[in-house]
């Protein structure tokens, strides 16, 4: 049985693992990435936020992504009962990127790993972690099975677990908490968008509210395909009979805006169905490891926060790991876990208040103060750590208060 020694072992080659690997390699550390899947592979999380562009730029991955000509995303549109609300990322409170991308994740993630390999980062695809033994000094011995079925041991000074829904370390250590989701489910597929309108309408990412708690996502890609999917209460999604394809066809009938555009489109794959997508961890770090990305918890697809939290956590974990390996003492709770939980807390308020109806009252109000809209737009762009923004610093109180004011105005 072979053994290899590395400074940092990264589990998972998605955006979180790729950003962590790029930074660690940039800093001169001996890095190895293990990935259970073969790339390209399908993944959800196809809409990015401007905040993550900073991460890709910092670790030297941005130019390779730009070369792919992914669909530019300049904002987001929300529709409900004939009303429209549009957020333009140029019109936001926080300084930062004012655009990002809408991406087929199979191509996007493979672009990242191709670039990593060009830089000299070794990635073991189709390699599964079967066990990890941590020592008192924080080093570890990880057992993996290669594509040929042979076992290999990897000795590491630190592990970054970016395994996404696989949650390798949390499962091995029995740290996965019960789901804290809204009890929602999602059903989605891709289509060849044969009726796509010309101009901006054909490129806009849109969230079409079809019931108070159920909405359709429409994410156009630059390759002519579009991702479509419904998110709503599990019991509502399940109330539509038939196969996943039949369910999705029936759900499309609920969208006045998109039904005609999509009624004759073939699904490019049988619609996928998943639920209970929010599974927070008891802790995001331990002696010799850090949990990042979706392994650290995923909220809800409604505001496209998944990849941003993945890259934010991946980069921060890599930075702190670098300091640790250089002999510095790291306060993981203050420097890592609290930082991530602060951002998650802000986004969770917006997710919760979306489904409570309060945020929808704000979005679809007859008028909204331009400065307040800019502040909310910053949150939707992923700048949830900017405490100069009142709608970040006092997120729960202000969202509730504004919704009440709007409700009183409409009643009056």
Image (tube, rainbow, N blue to C red):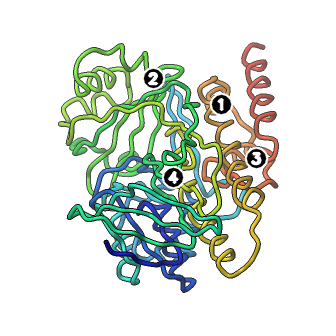
Furthest residue toward bottom: 28
Marks 1/2: CA distance? 15 Å
Disc 1 and disc 3: Cα gap in Å? 14 Å
Among the two numbered marks 3 and 2 on one chain, the one whose residue lies closer to the N terminus:
2
- Camera-side residue of 398 and 106: 106
- Residue 89 appears left or right of 94: left
Q: In which quarter of the image is the C terminus?
A: top right
Question: Which residue is at a point 26% across and 25% down the rendered structure image?
Answer: 249
Determine the secondary structure under disc 4.
helix
Q: Position of residue 6 (x, y in %)?
A: 48, 78
Residue 387 image offset from top left, x and y in percent: 80, 53
In what element is the residue under mark 3? Answer: helix
Count neighbours of disc 1 (C-alpha within 10 A) and say few if under 14, some if 14 to 19, many if 20 or more. Answer: many
User: Residue 233, image x and y in percent?
Assistant: 47, 21
**Residue 359, label in figure:** 1
Q: Is 136 above or below relative to 29?
A: above
Look at discs 1 and 4 and give the one toward the viewer: 4
Name the front one of labels 1 and 3: 3
Q: Please, what secondary structure does the residue beneath circle 1 have?
A: helix
Quadrant of the frame with the N terminus: bottom left
Q: Can you identify the residue that label 3 sits on?
A: 392
Of the two numbered discs 1 and 3 on the same chain, state the one appearing first in sequence: 1
Image quadrant in which you'd find residue 350: top right
In space, the residues marked 4 and 2 are separated at their CA atoms by 38 Å
Classify mark 4: residues with Cα within 10 Å, few (<14), some (14-19) or many (20+).
many
Task: Compare marks 1 and 4 and give the one earlier in the sequence.
Answer: 4
Mark 3 or 4: in front is 4
Mark linked to residue 210: 2
Query: Is the Cβ of the residue at disc 1 closer than 8 Å to that at disc 4?
Result: no
Residue sitting at x 72%, y 61%: 332
Q: In the image, which disc is placed on residue 169?
A: 4
């Amino acid at each position: 049985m072979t053994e290899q020694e590395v400074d940092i072992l990264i589990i998972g080659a998605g955006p979180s693992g790729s950003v962590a690997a790029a930074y660690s390699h940039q800093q001169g550390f001996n890095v190895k990435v293990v990935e259970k899947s073969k790339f390209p592979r399908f993944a959800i999380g196809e809409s990015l936020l401007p905040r993550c562009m900073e991460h890709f730029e910092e670790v030297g991955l941005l130019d390779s992504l730009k070369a792919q000509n992914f669909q530019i995303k300049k904002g987001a549109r929300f529709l409900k009962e004939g009303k429209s609300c549009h957020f333009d990322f140029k019109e936001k409170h926080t300084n930062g990127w004012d655009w990002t991308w809408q991406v087929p994740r199979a191509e996007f993630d493979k672009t990242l790993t191709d670039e990593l390999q060009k830089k000299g980062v070794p990635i073991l695809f189709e390699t599964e972690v079967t066990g990890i033994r941590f020592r008192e000094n924080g080093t570890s011995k990880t057992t993996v099975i290669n594509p040929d079925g042979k076992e290999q041991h990897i000795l590491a000074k630190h592990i970054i677990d970016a395994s996404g829904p696989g949650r390798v370390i949390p499962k091995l250590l029995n740290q996965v908490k019960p789901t804290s989701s809204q009890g929602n489910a999602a059903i989605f597929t891709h289509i060849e968008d044969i009726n796509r309108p010309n101009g901006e309408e054909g490129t806009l990412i849109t969230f079409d509210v079809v019931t108070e708690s159920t909405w359709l996502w429409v994410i156009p890609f630059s390759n002519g395909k579009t991702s479509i999917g419904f998110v709503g209460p599990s019991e509502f999604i399940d109330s539509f009979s038939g196969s996943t394809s039949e369910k999705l066809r029936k759900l499309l009938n609920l969208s006045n805006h998109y039904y005609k555009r999509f009624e004759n489109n073939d699904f490019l794959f049988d619609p996928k169905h998943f639920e209970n997508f929010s599974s927070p961890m008891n802790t995001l770090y331990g002696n010799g490891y850090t949990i990042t990305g979706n392994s650290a918890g995923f909220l809800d697809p409604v505001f496209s926060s998944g990849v941003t939290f993945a890259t934010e956590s991946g980069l921060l974990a890599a930075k702190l790991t670098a300091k640790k390996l250089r002999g510095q003492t790291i306060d993981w709770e203050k420097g890592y876990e609290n930082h991530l939980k602060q951002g998650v807390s802000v986004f969770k308020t917006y997710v919760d208040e979306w489904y409570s109806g309060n945020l929808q009252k704000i979005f679809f109000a007859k008028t909204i103060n331009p400065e307040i809209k800019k502040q909310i737009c910053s949150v939707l762009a992923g700048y949830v750590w900017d405490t100069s923004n009142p709608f970040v610093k006092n997120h729960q109180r202000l969202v509730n208060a504004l919704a009440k004011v709007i409700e009183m105005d409409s009643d009056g």
